[in-house]
Image: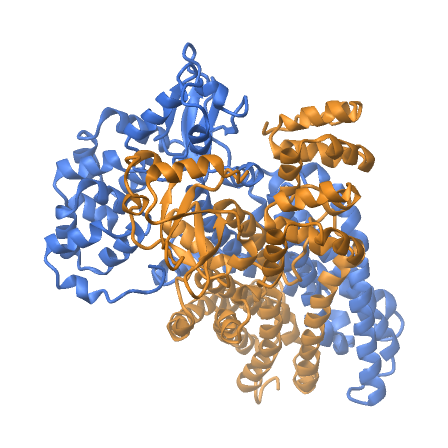
Chain colours: A orange, B blue
Amino acid sequence: MVSNRSNFSQYSALSAEELAAKLDRMYFADAVDIVNHLSFDQALAAFEHLPLDCAIGLFNKTELLRATALLTSLESEKAADILDGMAVVRAKDIFQDMNEKNRRRLFVLLEPATRTDLQKLMNYPRRSAGALMTTEFITVLADWTVEATLNLIRTVETGRETVYTAYIIDPETNVLLSAISLRLLVLSKPKAKVIDAAKHAQPIQCSPTMHQRDLARLFRRYDLLSIAVVDEANHIIGIVTVDNVLDSMTKTMSEETQKFGGMEALEKPYMQITFLNMLEKRGGWLCLLFVGEMLTASVMQHYEHELAHAIVLTLFIPLIMSSGGNSGSQATSLIIRALALNEIRLGDWWRVVLREIPMGLSLGAILGAIGYARVLVWQFTGIYNYGDHWFLIALTVGGTLIAIVMFGSLVGSMLPFVLKAMGFDPASASAPFVATFVDVAGIAIYFSIAAFILAGTLL
Amino acid sequence: MVSNRSNFSQYSALSAEELAAKLDRMYFADAVDIVNHLSFDQALAAFEHLPLDCAIGLFNKTELLRATALLTSLESEKAADILDGMAVVRAKDIFQDMNEKNRRRLFVLLEPATRTDLQKLMNYPRRSAGALMTTEFITVLADWTVEATLNLIRTVETGRETVYTAYIIDPETNVLLSAISLRLLVLSKPKAKVIDAAKHAQPIQCSPTMHQRDLARLFRRYDLLSIAVVDEANHIIGIVTVDNVLDSMTKTMSEETQKFGGMEALEKPYMQITFLNMLEKRGGWLCLLFVGEMLTASVMQHYEHELAHAIVLTLFIPLIMSSGGNSGSQATSLIIRALALNEIRLGDWWRVVLREIPMGLSLGAILGAIGYARVLVWQFTGIYNYGDHWFLIALTVGGTLIAIVMFGSLVGSMLPFVLKAMGFDPASASAPFVATFVDVAGIAIYFSIAAFILAGTLL
């Protein structure tokens, strides 16, 4: 099942009935692979013959390509049945992908409950518990028995294998009281009250606005399979299951890597995105960084005099700039993750400053020593002649490296804090952004130090 | 439970018995927080009074600080009982943390099964299914009834809430035949054969050497709660549960961000790592990159003549270098993720080349146009005078930007492929490494283009 059993052409040769029968016996994920390789008409014909349950299962997979086009090409009644049966989160995605005409045609055919759920879901922010939650979950009243709860689970057809918890609510107020896992239900005495069988008084719960990152933390902390999403009155409005968290985490991982790499996050796989869309995602940031980096030229124009008198200084510009950028990029990557994992909080910024200053100075001293040695070695071995003032030049390079690495570490570590304090995602801090910032300041630092050390000699 | 209920001092005042009684009624994760805030002696006393089940639960949490010290300070018999009861993965971590004396003292007291499991686990590579798996799972013979299976689940005390699947093996050969979820067991007729009640013929399984990244892909693909780990004879040797995958994914996310940021991955949280350890993790790569970047100085020395005659060229060095680095960093982040998600494979490198060349040229053309315009605007508005040959200089800057952005995109996108082809993790490609590589080539490209365009005028 795992490997590529992908002799897909054999399936194209089958009749729609035969194909549907075959797909119905497979894992949804494998069936989706096959449907993705069919022509559009073949795929549509297969869906026309698939049992409703299986069709719902396939549309529930985000991997199904052409989902919106397939669904809107099906007979309206069947399409509405599928939408009613689907995970609401996924139905929402498909709905948002439709054109206005189809949306209007299908929306009126949906069950009222689906309609309400869809409208609710569309209002929650991206990657929040509300946007990730499913509204299909099992609630029982606190005075039910374990047996009655198990019977309910047997009869309720949720179609979702991951629903492994029953939520216990107050018979009077509907307030969420507790949660009981299927495992505990099976272990408990059938005649016991379900509230007594539930192990912990208060279940782990979250608000619909909680970000996926914090959700993932709760899942890991309490080894959860699902979490209850509650409103302000403590009424359960949905659950987020571990498979949705896993999905969302993987997407976040890609988005954060791309942002850290200095571009807008992509919504589609690398090979599927159009050229123009990709150009936009990369070009926007690249232009912005370019305009920022233009300041380096302005700063250098300002030091025109020094440049003309000490061309030898220009030899070290790339070396110095890159060291500042690299140390900044290291510090940013560290702090982004420490903030994401709640290892440090916004108020800890000064603790980080107290760590990064000695760290930056030490790292700078190491690079400074290497840079200093480099000038000396080249000078004495005769590889290059830095002129009469080689000693002062070595000193300038070494001193600048200490200052710039310290500055880079400090700026790099503070940027995620600044973003967070301003209400942005700290993970949108990017290595190129830090580098650009440090570059501009780096040139200024370099020439200031040079002006000081070389005053009266070269300058 | 979720928020900080952290009035920890109240717990320090309790007697060991009272404290143990309180801890026993909490979520393990919350109890661990409290124990972490106790003094070592108090924590030890609490463990001496905790029921075995609860002590095992706490030691199972990776968040428990001083775990090895606490365990080895307990009475040998009790320590061995805890180790026997713990998830083997976690017991392995603690064992590897002990000194030789304690390891020898405790190892002989363990049950033979635990000893074998421990030795097996220590041999699997990091982040592999074998290293992540637990050896506590439920197997039943294919000819058992659903009822008998449920009864087994009721009696087996696994202590792990996440064990939600029973694995069905052949009564003769012990080969893994199928898997059945607890939910399906509850839904099935008690007298039915368990193998008939299981929905799919072959369960989703993996080898003990499968990497966590591929595991996560399977979990997402099939919405799994656990996966069977099988040996070559198709005998089940363990299971990996979704909570371990979630944990491992979070750690991988941090490691990859740190590597991409140009440093060695940390094993501990930012605030807990020692200064020297941190210096090592960051200094190593920083020095390596620094030495690589030194080549820029050598390249520039080579173009000494051009530099002396056209100092104006130096003004654009930072701008040109950073554009190459930024476009490379973008391309690397894209390809790292696309490879991690199996969107592209090693053999697709030429497809990526075919995409990145026109992409790099287009992005380069945009930046080139801005750079060109910048020289013109500064020249005409009189902000800066680039001399008689300002037009040729603008042409040099624009042309170099096209070449360098294309080069950066190409190098950045190919680096993860090269690493993968060499057997390394493509995610160890770092933004600073790409930037350093592109910088050195960038200087050479710049001066070559300048030498060509400005020959006979400035040069």
Q: Quadrant of residue B79?
A: top left
At 79% from the left edge and 47% from the top edge, which residue is drawn? B354
Give the position of the C terminus of chain A as an image quadrant.
bottom right
Q: Residue furthest top?
A: B172
Q: Is residue B420 above or below residue B376?
A: above
Q: Give the x, y percent position of residue B12.
A: 16, 62
At 73% from the left edge and 25% from the top edge, which residue is drawn? A19
Q: Give the x, y percent position of residue A338.
A: 44, 61
- Can residue B350 be seen from the camera position used here? yes
Q: Give the x, y percent position of residue B60.
A: 30, 43
At 24% from the left edge and 58% from the top edge, which residue is drawn? B34
Image position of A312 (left or right of B182): right
Q: Is residue B378 above or below residue B394?
A: below
- Can residue B450 be seen from the camera position used here? no
Q: In which quarter of the image is residue B120?
A: top left
For the residue pair A302 and B372, the one nearer the viewer reads as B372
Q: Which residue lies furthest to the front in this view?
A: A172
